[in-house]
Amino acid sequence: MSVQPARSAPEHAVLEGRYVRLEPVAPGHAADLFAISAGEEAEARYRFLPNDPPMSLGEVNNWIATVQNGPDLYVAVIDKASGRAVGRQAWLRIRPEHGSVEIGAIYWGLPMARSRLATEALYLFARHAFDDLGYRRFEWKCNDRNAPSKAAATRFGFIYEGLFRQDMIVKGENRDTAWFSILDSEWPALREEYERWLNPENFDAAGQQRTKLALRGLDSQEG
C-alpha cells in the first residue's frame, strides 16, 4: 500500500483559534515573553528546557533573533482576550518527506498553563499538521524526569511509545527522553473531543470548564 508524504512543511503562518492566536515569534513579543519568564515559579518551569530563564529584555531579543534564523519554527501564543503573548511553542523535527513533525520547545506561562488557552494552542498545531498539511505523525518528547510534561502529553491524547536512554546531555545532566505520538488514524476521534471541549458552551462566565477533556482511550477508535 502506497504511503504519501505530507504536502509541505509548516510555514511562518498565523493560526487563529477562539481563544488564542499563534503567530511567528517576533521582536514585538519580547516584552510579554520576558514578563512571563520572571519569578521563582517561572524558573522552576524552565527546569527541563535547554535554556535558562532570561535575565533581561535584551536576552529575549537575542533569543528571538537566533530562533528566527534557525531550522525550527517558533510561534508566540497570543491570548486574544488581552492581546498579550502568554507563551511560545515550536515546530521541531520537521520531516514532511516522512509525514512526521513534533511540537516542542513549549513554554506556556502561568496565565495559560492548564487552561483552555494551552489546550487550544496544542489543538491548533495538531489540526494544522493533520488536516491542512497531511501529516501522518505528530510527536511530543520530553525529559523522562519531567512528570508534568508527561502528564500533559497523556491528557492531550498522545500515546507513550518508549524511552530513549541517555539520549542527550542538557545543562550538564543526562536526559532520558520519553517519546509520545498521535497518528493520523487516531486524530479524527481526538479532534471531535477537542472541539467539543473547546466549545464556549463548555465554560461558565468565569471561564471554568463544565466538563473535562476526555481524550484517553479515544486513540484506539476509528475516525
Image (tube, rainbow, N blue to C red):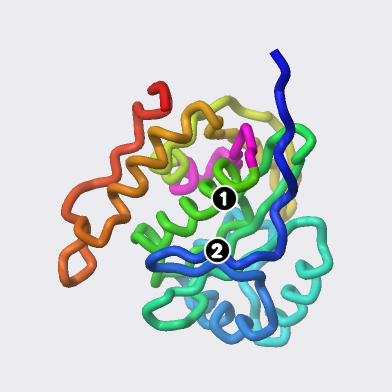
The residue depicted at 40 percent of the width and 37 percent of the height is: 190
Per the image, is 180 magenta?
no
The residue depicted at 43 percent of the width and 46 percent of the height is: 152
113 or 24: nearer the eye? 24
Q: Dot 1 corresponds to which residue?
A: 128
Displayed quadrant of residue 156: top left
Q: Three-letter amino acid code at disc 2?
A: Leu
SS at circle 1: helix
Report x, y in % for residue 5.
74, 33
Mark 1 and mark 2: Cα distance apart in space: 8 Å
Q: Is residue 105 left or right of residue 156?
A: right
SS at circle 2: strand
Q: Is residue 13 left or right of residue 9?
A: left
Displayed quadrant of residue 164: top right
Mark 1 neighbour class, 10 Å CA radius: few under 14, some 14 to 19, many 20 or more: some
Residue furthest toward the top?
1
Report x, y in % for residue 125.
55, 52
Quick check: marks 1 and 2 in contact, CB under 8 Å? Answer: yes
Q: Which residues are magenta?
A: 134-150
Q: Dot 2 corresponds to which residue?
A: 15
The residue depicted at 20 percent of the width and 59 percent of the height is: 201
